[in-house]
Amino acid sequence: MAGQIPDLNAEARTGTGKGAARQARRDGFVPGVVYGGEADPQAIQIPFNVLLKKLKDGRFLSTLFNLKVEGQEDVRVICRGVQRDIIKDLPTHIDLLRLRRTSKINLFIHVDFENEEAAPGIKKGGVLTIVRPEVELNVTAGDIPERLVVDLTGKDIGDTITISQIDLPEGAKPTIDRDFVIANLSAPSGLRSAGEDEDGEGEGEEAAAEE
């Protein structure tokens, strides 16, 4: 099931060239261009504050957007470059690539954990440590999963959950070519401390006996 693709609202920009780009910036916009997808490049402009917020939210360069321009059909795009002011480090231009539903792209997908009540390790007070709350996958634009699901049923203290244990959508694959860790289930800190204390006492007793 494809996830909800966030909207990116823009306006068509009538002029092109440096003069038109400067005017867009004076008017509070960031100029840009949309290209690819077997269509002519289109000049656009995005409100500066809107773009800046999305950049600060993170993952902008690996997020698929639904580009909305008034009077035109929505199109799926992904950012392929943001030019910034070399002094202020603020966006001055943006390049967006149109995608077909069959296009392959890299995106970060959120990981959810289910059935904690069916995990013996959690019932014993174990701690679930999430190593990767998101996983970067190479996916088809038309079949982007809303999330990845980790089933904790039967998981006990000491168990490690890796990417190979997660059912991925057909055609999707991780961008990292190894079986990396998603999460692990460890003993509660109280039990770990008790175990360490016991080990320490044992070592002390043995040392005393040797003396």
Image: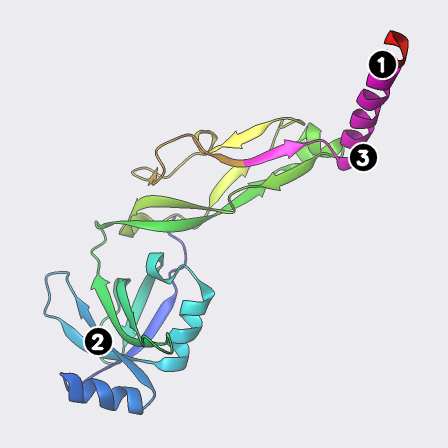
Q: Is residue 62 above or below residue 143?
A: below
Count neighbours of disc 2 (C-alpha within 10 A) and say few if under 14, some if 14 to 19, many if 20 or more.
Answer: few
Disc 3 residue type (three-letter): Gly
* Residue 58 placement, left or right of 77: right
Position of the C terminus by quadrant: top right
Report the residue at 34% width, 88% height from top: 28
Secondary-structure class at tag 1:
helix
Q: Main secondary structure of the magenta part?
A: helix
- Residue 167 vertical position relative to residue 17 in the rendered view, above or below: above
Q: Residue furthest top?
A: 210
For marks 2 and 1, the one nearer the N-term is 2
Residue 25 image label: none
* Magenta residue check for 8: no
Residue topped by disc 1: 207
In this figure, which residue is indicated by the disc labeled 2?
Answer: 72
The residue that disc 3 covers is: 190
Q: Which residues are magenta?
A: 183-205
Quarter of the image for residue 156 reads: top right
Q: Tell me which numbered mark, 2 or 3, is placed earlier along the sequence.
A: 2
| Amino acid on which disc 2 is placed | Gln
Residue type at mark 1? Ala
Looking at the rendered structure, the secondary structure element under dot 2 is loop
Q: Earlier in the sequence, mark 1 or mark 3?
A: 3
| Residue at horizontal 31 percent and vertical 45 percent from the top | 139
Q: Position of residue 73 (x, y in %)?
A: 23, 71
Check residue 198 for magenta coloring: yes
- Local packing at callout 1 (Cα closer than 10 Å; few below 14, some 14-19, many 20+) is few
